[in-house]
């Protein structure tokens, strides 16, 4: 939860003669850099930089628009790419200083990013929002992973692909997400054709930041496969794109297609300009970009088939390897080498987890709870967790759906929304809070059961990210999914994973598996399922599944109708405001 800060300060003194790599994790709200020793993976220093503009959901920054209000629509989520450069300027030097190492001993740099997060650029990588005349165009900004306003375009992509029998569709569980490259690109074309025409590259942020570091644009195999519908050496055909919209016919050839680098390769070397930003030596290796979730599996030493790694933060991404290709309904993709060469990498996810807990704490908890927490020197999340932990399972009489940011897996529908059933006048904040914790665990169990039923058995569950520090949450997950939950000893697992890839790119290890074995984090805790708790949660999960299927599998369109009403009301309100003088 967001109130538990990562530890700071060097873990141990630098070792004479040692070499180091830097991993930089670009998250939803901040970027985090970690200095890692190549020989054993020891994390020696950390730097964190919060994005000054955060996530734009209501309007563009007034400073960028000359003070004119430019509102955003329902389910928009944008970011400012300059914030990402500032992470390099601030977090990386801070991490090096925290570690107390000589920058000359750093041999490589690796990065990871949220995905699918898209940057429209010119041919030289300049983001469109930085081009004169485009700062007041919402479509010129970064579309963050949780930008869900392209759901109508995703629906059309899915309908046309199904009608045409596109061979790539089953690789994604039968549904393409509104979060991904093609849906967001099609929305840009249809809502702002002029900006679409000006855009020369449609770039994953994971690749854009590497471009900034090296001066070279290289697509990474991970996002190309999972978010860019790149399968068996090809993107969707021109005929398919034409069927979506004739003006979209050249989207791949004109905006997307580029050289693809394998994970762990060097995309290039650090330029003199980027060396000045970071304080690192020019010419060191910079690894091909990657996704925060997928780099975490090597950091957790969780790359064997059957080991499912859940990266739990604002959202949760579930990744695992398998030896064979299987079709799993509602998954986010199966990609050859998407996590580790020689294996099929599978991905699923939940669009809201920590975000849901944060939303509840920020909007639905009375002031006296905050006061009571402060009086005890606790954050409100810790206080609510203690109160919730005292309850017997099911005593709150509630069941919730974890769809406050839509459903990524297994329904792949971002028009869905959150639900809490069973509230009465006796319901307390800690009751609802626990129900939301449980709902996210039920969502994970739904994903695990989909994998198991499709011939991709989950034999081990590994939890990484910020949320595993909540011990109640981890025990709930163990009891709900009926498997031991292993957490890892790194509080900055994605950054560690990026550092592991940097070590491979720098030539310190022959491949990612070898680097994972040497540099991956040791286990922290193991939470065993309690048999009586498992039985109690089986009963609640049955109710969750009934609610899940009622609202999510076509039996009731209420959520979709409400989203349509909200969108229409928002658009009408924006139109009225547009004619009112500032």
Image: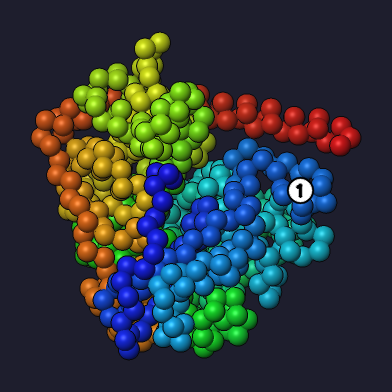
Residue with the mark numbered 1: 62
Nearest to the observer: residue 358 or residue 328: 358
Quadrant position of residue 357: top left
Bin the neighbour count of mark 1 within 10 Å (Cα to Cα): few under 14, some 14-19, many 20 and up: few
| Residue at the image point whose x is 56% and y is 67% from the top | 90
SS class, disc 1: loop
| Residue at the image point whose x is 73% and y is 64% from the top | 130
Nearest to the observer: residue 226 or residue 460: 460
Quadrant position of residue 292: bottom left
Q: Position of residue 174 (x, y in %)?
A: 41, 49
Nearest to the observer: residue 169 or residue 499: 499
| Residue at the image point whose x is 16% and y is 34% from the top | 534
| Residue at the image point whose x is 32% and y is 34% from the top | 385
Quadrant position of residue 143: bottom right
Q: Position of residue 538 (x, y in %)?
A: 19, 30
Residue 341 left/right relative to 121? left
- Residue at the far top in the pictured view: 425
């Amino acid at each position: 939860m967001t109130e538990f800060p990562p530890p700071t300060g060097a873990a141990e003194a630098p070792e004479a003669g040692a070499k180091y790599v830097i991993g930089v994790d670009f998250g939803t709200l901040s970027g985090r850099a970690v200095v890692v020793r190549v020989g054993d993976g020891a994390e020696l220093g950390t730097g964190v930089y919060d994005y000054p503009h955060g996530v734009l959901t209501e309007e563009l920054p007034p400073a960028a628009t000359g003070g004119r209000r430019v509102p955003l629509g329902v389910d928009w989520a944008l970011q400012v790419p300059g914030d990402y450069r500032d992470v390099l300027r601030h977090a990386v030097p801070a991490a090096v200083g925290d570690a107390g190492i000589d920058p000359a001993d750093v041999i490589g740099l690796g990065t990871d990013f949220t995905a699918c997060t898209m940057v429209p650029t010119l041919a030289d990588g300049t983001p469109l929002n930085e081009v004169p005349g485009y700062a007041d165009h919402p479509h010129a900004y970064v579309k963050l992973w949780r930008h869900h306003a392209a759901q109508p375009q995703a629906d059309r992509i899915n309908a046309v692909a199904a009608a045409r029998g596109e061979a790539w569709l089953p690789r994604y569980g039968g549904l393409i997400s509104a979060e991904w490259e093609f849906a967001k690109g099609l929305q840009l074309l249809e809502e702002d054709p002029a900006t679409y025409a000006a855009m020369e590259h449609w770039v994953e942020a994971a690749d854009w930041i590497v471009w900034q570091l090296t001066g070279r644009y290289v697509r990474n195999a991970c996002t190309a496969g999972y978010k860019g519908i790149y399968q068996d050496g090809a993107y969707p055909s021109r005929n398919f794109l034409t069927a979506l919209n004739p003006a979209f016919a050249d989207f791949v050839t004109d905006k997307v297609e580029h050289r693809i680098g394998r994970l762990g390769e060097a995309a290039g070397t650090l330029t003199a300009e980027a060396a000045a930003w970071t304080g690192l030596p020019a010419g060191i290796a910079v690894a091909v970009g990657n996704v925060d979730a997928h780099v975490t599996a090597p950091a957790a030493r969780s790359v064997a088939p059957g080991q499912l790694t859940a990266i739990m933060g604002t959202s949760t991404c579930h990744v695992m390897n398998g030896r064979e290709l299987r079709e799993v309904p509602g998954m986010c993709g199966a990609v050859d080498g998407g996590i580790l060469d020689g294996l099929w990498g599978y991905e699923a996810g939940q669009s809201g987890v920590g975000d849901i807990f944060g939303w509840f704490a920020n909007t639905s908890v009375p002031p006296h709870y905050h006061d009571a927490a402060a009086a005890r020197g606790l954050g409100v999340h810790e206080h609510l967790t203690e109160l919730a932990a005292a309850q017997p399972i099911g005593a709150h009489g509630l069941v919730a759906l974890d769809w406050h940011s839509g459903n990524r897996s297994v329904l792949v529908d971002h028009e869905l929304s959150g639900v809490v059933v069973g509230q009465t006048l006796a319901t307390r904040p800690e009751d609802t809070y626990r129900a939301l914790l449980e709902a996210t665990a039920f969502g994970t169990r739904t994903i695990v059961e989909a994998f198991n039923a499709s011939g991709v058995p989950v034999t081990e569950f590994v939890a990484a990210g910020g949320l595993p520090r909540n011990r109640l949450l981890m025990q709930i997950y163990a009891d709900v999914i009926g498997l031991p939950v292993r957490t890892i000893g790194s509080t900055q697992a994605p950054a560690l994973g990026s550092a592991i890839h940097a070590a491979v790119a720098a030539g310190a290890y022959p491949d990612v598996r070898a680097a994972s074995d040497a540099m991956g984090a040791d286990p922290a805790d193991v939470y065993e399922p309690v048999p009586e708790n498992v039985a109690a949660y089986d009963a609640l999960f049955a109710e969750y599944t009934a609610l899940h299927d009622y609202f999510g599998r076509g039996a009731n369109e209420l959520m979709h109708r409400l989203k349509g009403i909200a969108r229409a009301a928002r658009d009408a309100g924006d139109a009225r405001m547009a004619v009112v003088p500032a």
